[in-house]
Amino acid sequence: MLYRENGQFKTSYRSDQQIFPIAQDRIAIAMILAIAFIAVPMLASDYIFRAILIPFVIMALAALGVNILVGYCGQISLGSGAFMAVGAYGAYNFFMRLPGLPLIPALILGGLCATFFGILFGLPSLRVKGLYLAVATLAAQFFSDWMFLRIKWFTLDTPSGAISVSNLQVFGLSIESAQSKYLFCLAVLAVLALLAKNLVRGAIGREWMAIRDMDVAAAVIGIRPMYAKLSAFAVSSFIIGVAGALWAFFYLGAWEPGAFSVDLSFKLLFMVIIGGLGSIMGSFFGAAFIVILPIALNQFLPFLAGLIGRDISTTAASHAELMIFGGLIVWFLIVEPHGLAKLWSTAKQKLRLWPFPH
């Protein structure tokens, strides 16, 4: 009986158009943010920060960018790893070649580099779509792998091709501890998620969804397909590029082009499909499923084997983890092909009526 809208009247356009129109949703979001920004840094260990929380936050941001392009605009992309790589190497070059440049402008400039790269490889979307567009964006992945591996200028002529960053600071505050890295990445995620939520609710978001549903009909009613598609590539690539810079600077610390392989592109696409296409919340669910579940299985399987008096090897646990993980992906897609976000939406609708049948 707690999740009700009775008595929550809208007396202005502003209150009617707010992001969370139900008071319970606003309270829940405020509590989640308070837990994430205050309680988690006080209670979590260094291992949880480095192994779970930081990769989850960054992957959620990258999945958010992919969801804008694939879920909201309907443009299938397999070049997300390339956009992350461009954002990471772009931010690295600006950070290292311009002494005294603050970290936040370097991250933004890295995201802008990914934006231009995404627009360049988004041009084929004006002529092709579906699997043909997926192949065209896959070319971005192979091109970025070759570019960062062969052109030594991007790595400051490092012989090994591996680069690293250190002594990161924001507003004079050092960001070296796992806790500070988590808080900074979480703040970036919160800001960009809010901006993305407002974008998809506005006119440009409606244009993206019209192109996704039927691009010919969208063009008939006056929507410019070129502007809508390239703007989706631009916004998506910027968010993914910033996520790539965060992944390199705050999670990896030292990296090489292999860190942004095609496997990462597929993983991001799986996050969006499992979490829910066309849903901001689905990006978080998908990232949690892909990042946290394998770690949980890796810890739970030896414990479960010990309960039944069995000793499971590391190799067997790894194989069982992959089998269970793949089986769960298939099961979720069969039970709810619209993703985990749809299950969450259905649960909220049922809570509005509970305990009364309808």
Image (cartoon, rainbow, N blue to C red):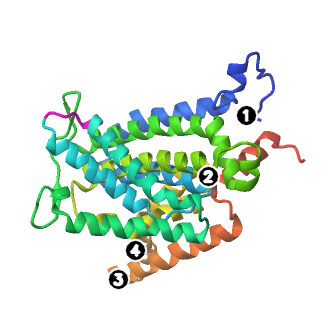
Question: What secondary structure do most residues of the magenta stretch adopt?
Answer: loop
Question: What kind of residue is marked 4?
Answer: Pro
Is 210 situated above or below 27? Answer: below
Q: Residues within 10 Å of mark 4 (few under 14, many from 20)?
A: some
Question: What kind of residue is marked 1?
Answer: Leu
State the residue at coordinates (65%, 35%). 203
Q: Which residue is mark 1?
A: 2
Question: What kind of residue is marked 3?
Answer: Thr
Residue 59 image offset from top left, x and y in percent: 42, 54
Q: Nearer the viewer, mark 1 or mark 4?
A: 1
Residue 68 image offset from top left, x and y in percent: 55, 49
Is 356 a magenta residue?
A: no
Q: CA distance from mark 2 to mark 4?
A: 43 Å
Name the mark on residue 249.
none
> In front: 91, or 44?
91
Q: CA distance from mark 4 to mark 3?
A: 11 Å
Horizontal side, residue 3 vs residue 146: left or right: right
Q: CA distance from mark 3 to mark 1?
A: 47 Å
Q: Residues within 10 Å of mark 1 (few under 14, many from 20)?
A: few
Question: What kind of residue is marked 2?
Answer: Cys
Indicate which disc, 2 or 4, sits on the residue closer to the N terminus.
2
Indicate which disc, 2 or 3, sits on the residue closer to the N terminus.
2
Residue 136 image offset from top left, x and y in percent: 49, 68
Q: Which residue is mark 4?
A: 302
Q: In this picture, which residue range is highlighted in magenta?
A: 100-104
Q: Which residue is mark 2?
A: 73
Indicate which disc, 1 or 4, sits on the residue closer to the N terminus.
1
Indicate which disc, 2 or 1, sits on the residue closer to the N terminus.
1
Indicate which disc, 4 or 3, sits on the residue closer to the N terminus.
4
